[in-house]
Amino acid sequence: MEHNLHLWFIPLLPLTGALINGALGRRFSKPLVTAIALLSTAAAFGMALNVVMQFSGLQLPYVENHGAWIQLPGTFNVDFAFMLDQLSLIMLLVVTGVGFLIHIYSAGYMADDDGYYRFFSYLNLFMFFMLMLVLANNYLLMFVGWEGVGLASYLLIGFYFHKHSAAQAGKKAFIVNRVGDFGFLLGMFLLVKHFGSLDYSVIFNQILQHPAQFPIESGAGLLTLVSFCLMVGATGKSAQIPLYVWLPDAMEGPTPVSALIHAATMVTAGIYMVARSNVIFNHAPMALNVVAIIGALTAFFAASIGIVQTDIKRVLAYSTISQLGYMFMACGVAAYSAGIFHLMTHAFFKALLFLSAGSVIHALGGEQDMRYMGGLRKHIPVTFWVMTIATIAIAGIPPFAGFFSKDEILWKAFSSSDHGWIFWAIGLVTALMTSFYMFRLLFMTFFGERREGSSLEPGHGHGGHGAHEDHGHGREPHESPWIMLGPLVVLAVLSVVGGWVGIPHSMGKLIGVQQNHFEEFLAPVFEHGNSEQVAASESKEPPTKYAKGEAASDTHPSDATEIELTGVSILAGLIGLFAAWYLYLSRPELPARIVARIGGLYSLVVHKYYVDEIYQDGIVEPIVDGSRSVLWKGVDVEVIDGAVNGAGSTAKGGWSIMREMQSGNIRSYAGWVALGAACLVAYMIWMGAQ
Amino acid sequence: MTPTGMDRFALTAITFLPAVAALLLMLFPRGHKQEDEHGHLLYGNDQAFKYAALFASLIAFIISLHLPAHFDYHTAGFQPRFSTDLLWIKFPEIHYHLGVDGISMWLVILTTFLVPLSILIQWNSIHGRVKEFMVLILLLETAMIGVFLALDLFLFYVFWEATLIPMALLIGMYGHERRVYAAVKFFLYTMVASVFMLGSIIWLYLHVGSFDYIEIQAALLSGKIPGIDHAALWLFLGFFAAFAVKVPLFPFHTWLPDAHVEAPTAGSVLLAGVLLKMGTYGLMRFNVALFPEEARKHAPWIITLAIIGIIYGALVALVQPNLKKLVAYSSVSHLGFVVLGIFSFTTAGADGAVYQMLNHGVSTGALFMLCGMIYDRRHTFEIKQFGGLATPMPVYAIIFLIITLSSIGLPLTNGFVGEFLVLSGAFQAKSLYGALAATGVIWSAGYMLWLYQRTFYGELTLDVNRRLPDATMREKVSLFPLVAMAIIMGLFSPYWMQAIDPSSRAVNNARVSTMGIQGTTSETMTRNSAPPIVRSQITNHQSPITR
């Protein structure tokens, strides 16, 4: 194979953009900044397309090595090496494609912001790290991207740094992610200790080639431990229980950032990492089960919070957490390709939702509270239509993108094991809630009458939207410029057709498509002789059952069941739609009455189950207070330093010398030192003279 | 290649050039006396002294680059081509013996690299007595380099103690309000601890009959010194006392925050950047390489102290209201990593420890420079006095951010490589060590980002901060090399490792034997190479897949 794809160039392009704009952008004109940022991203996207063109001729996985990063000969090596396979190709396309669209949108959205160059510099920096993450050939290089996107996220959440809440949210995101990274690090240490390498291929081949040494673990073995550690990392980055708390606060960042980083790409890194490590996870059924449980709980839990939020971006934030929960659950039932499929469709429709929300906020001069919206359908029709498409897509109504991927996950969960129906049921209820809160958002925003009032302080633009202040509230809401609407339309098209590449097997039969193309495409990454592996092992643990069923899917007996379940999930989506219509359009006075009726529960949910408070009072405060009053003022000052000073002053004659020396007279002090030096020299001479 | 005259002379030239320059400065007249409005004494030739000292330290830096350029990367121990061994005092036999290996070479270069930068950053904030300041800095440089290069234990001790005097004077004469207290504490604390080391050195001399490091090491490793069985522990502890205080290892660290807060900027930079490394260097060179059995026997509690230091230092740093104290406590935490790496007795741990010594010099050196810059402007280190500084001082804010990221070990900065290696080595030694120490990544992010938020983000609350001037050209010039190194060392670590790795392996491989001196037995090789399962794969894992 004589292909040289120059993969390293793909992340390098946005990095160059980031460095140029970061260093010189202050002196550049806005068009120049825009050109640098957009062209570097476009070029990366172009190179990704070039990779697609050449893909069929490649021998996979394709690896490019650019020399050593850390080298301890004979002990441990990590290279700057990039890898391309089916999985990284999909990630590459999603990241560069959606990333490029959001860059275009941002050129419009951020046009009036003073920090324009800074914004694009950070955004390009994010692209660099994200591309490192998906193209890396080993865990350590993935970790570079992993922490790097965290940095970019930190910078962008805190973009309006003069705002306390924004600075606070950025820091919170970084530190919570570091808790996850701690798990990731431990996972890597275990891998280094037992495999002597962090290269994917070395580790995975070892495991696959030595089934005796690496059996499918029924208890908590090495690979289970590794899986748990990696999972902790993934819960941080992909905002799962218990580390999801940073994501809602991350909405302090500019809206395009929420779309790109906190919905479409960065937060999916955890899903990618678990999917990438599927060989390890497949050997750790216990860890997989926990992943599935965490995913299911997060999906449900976040959706329930999403129902009562009134800030348009926060609804979407909790929705993102919930949808990531779906993907996590998919990974947990070893349906990695379904998880990645949902990752892709979600990237389309969630980016679209956020960008549309941005367009709404833009139209209203910074207003984010849905209680002060309403009736916007007529004012911003394009935004309305694309957002409607995205809402249908996420609600799981066919034939829009979200339907196929969500349904695939639900079915895989159901058929994964004897207990699979539990995951399916949770997923189904979540789907209903998703449909409800999304249509609630749509109805509250675009339908009914415009509600008066504002959540914004007079004379104060909301957050960074100060730039839009001049649009004011007295004026009519206005449609966004086409530089913003263009990307929305493209994403809307993708939100419709994006799911057609992965029409599930059973449905495909009905319309004459024989295979789930998406799953088939990813099969080399997720199956690699897995079935033999499974057959060879004695284990009959649940997650492997799916792999077996996969191998024999042509004769699957339950196509009919699958179709039935699909019907049920469509129904759930429609019920959610109907409920939202009934409560927010037909009987708008009802929600308030329901709230009054269930007061306590409502209050619990609206306060997000008090998780933030529990973390703050139960973890953060004790650490800070304990460090201050016990460790610093107690142990350090009183005990240790007290002992030191005490010893110094009680030493024989020490006190008077100390007092003499502390007289503050430099000259006498210098004299003491000189005396000491003189003694030393005399001592040397004396020794020399002997 | 045969050694050239330059090679033979190089170590002496690097060591003594600053001292010679200091002597010349002493002879040079101050110029006419004047007083500024604050009553500080100024002299006509002050500028000339500054330029002369800067020039001399730059020359020393350039000469020191001769070492990596002509270093033999295939030699694990001390480089024969650079070694100098002359009889200094006949009886007791004290040699002027200098030598360099992959560990000391980079520490020497760290020193020569930091000195000119610290002179430059202090340029306008020496209030009076400029001549003495420059003389002291240059004398200090000689002493520090001497510590890293001396291979005669007596010579080593002389250099070791010689660093104390100029540093104590720098703190005592040029520091802030409580400077005398801090200087005395620093001086007495470290001096007392060094006495124990002197005891060990004298015992060794009396029983081996030499101060020569190589001879003493050979004798110790042969296990044939009479009485060593009983003495080994005390000798080990004697060295350990001196080094543990210097590092400083918890709970011997309380001199450090005081010394740092009171020291002038240049003093802090060199104190954190170089002087603390003398402690960790000593632990490797003496405690581990001379007493391998004792070191391994006592590793558990030393590692325990190191891990306590990592977590404790970070937590105490978290709640400091004083910027400079915060950075000082963060040093306790960072140096804990170094000690952990050294006493993990793994290749990754030792390599990482040495790398982390250099990294800490770069990043904490830069942090202290940044502290000094803000002090020059606001005359306070109270974090409460800042807030929103990113608006008036954007360049300063960006440099501070990059250094912060290096300090918390973000990948692609130097800190990450060192931390990862140390932690992974510690984890190989015992999973619990690695796991506990790895929580450091969370704490460090906590205290540094909280500091960053309180200093740079939020509204500008105080009017005095509204018009603070951003970094000047001089300040940028002093900081830029450090920022560049933080990133370069994060990207190209193999360049440094090629020298560090063989030398730190040699330190780890030194073992006492009844069969004579040993460097690399098969047993020690096993201990220091990869775990058994995969050793066969390591050599061929760069098969078609990665190459």
Image (cartoon, coloured by chain):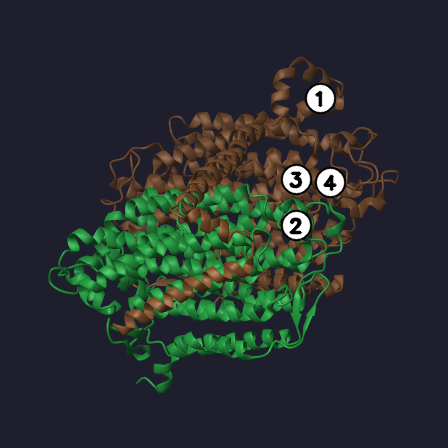
Chain colours: A brown, B green
| Category of crowding for the residue at label 2, using alpha-carbon neighbours closer than 10 angstroms: few (below 14), some (14–19), many (at least 20) | many
| Category of crowding for the residue at label 4, using alpha-carbon neighbours closer than 10 angstroms: few (below 14), some (14–19), many (at least 20) | some
Is residue A63 something that shows in the picture? no
On residue A390, the disc is 3
The local secondary structure at tag 2 comes to helix
| Category of crowding for the residue at label 3, using alpha-carbon neighbours closer than 10 angstroms: few (below 14), some (14–19), many (at least 20) | many
User: Splitting the image into 4 quarters, where does residue A129 fall?
Assistant: bottom right
Q: CA distance from mark 2 to mark 3?
A: 39 Å
**Subunit ID for the residue under disc 3:** A
In the rendered image, the vertical position of residue A18 relative to residue A402, given as above or below: below
Give the residue pinned by disc 2.
B456
Give the residue pinned by disc 4.
A385
Which amino acid, by three-letter code, is at mark 3? Answer: Ala
Give the residue pinned by disc 1.
A583
Residue in front for this viewpoint, B508 or A330: B508
Which amino acid, by three-letter code, is at mark 1? Answer: Leu
Is residue B400 left or right of B186 when viewed as pictured?
A: right
Is residue A438 left or right of A236 when viewed as pictured?
A: right
Q: CA distance from mark 3 to mark 1?
A: 21 Å
Which quadrant of the rendered structure holds the N terminus of chain B?
bottom left
**Subunit ID for the residue under disc 4:** A
| Category of crowding for the residue at label 1, using alpha-carbon neighbours closer than 10 angstroms: few (below 14), some (14–19), many (at least 20) | some
**Subunit ID for the residue under disc 1:** A
Identified at 22% across, 68% down, the residue is B210
Q: CA distance from mark 1 to mark 4?
A: 22 Å
User: Splitting the image into 4 quarters, where does residue B400 fall?
Assistant: bottom right
Choose mark 1 or mark 4, whichever is in front.
Answer: 1
In the rendered image, the vertical position of residue B152 relative to residue A336, given as above or below: below
**Disc with the residue nearer the chain's start (1 vs 4):** 4
Q: Are marks 4 and 3 on the same chain?
A: yes
Q: CA distance from mark 4 to mark 3?
A: 9 Å
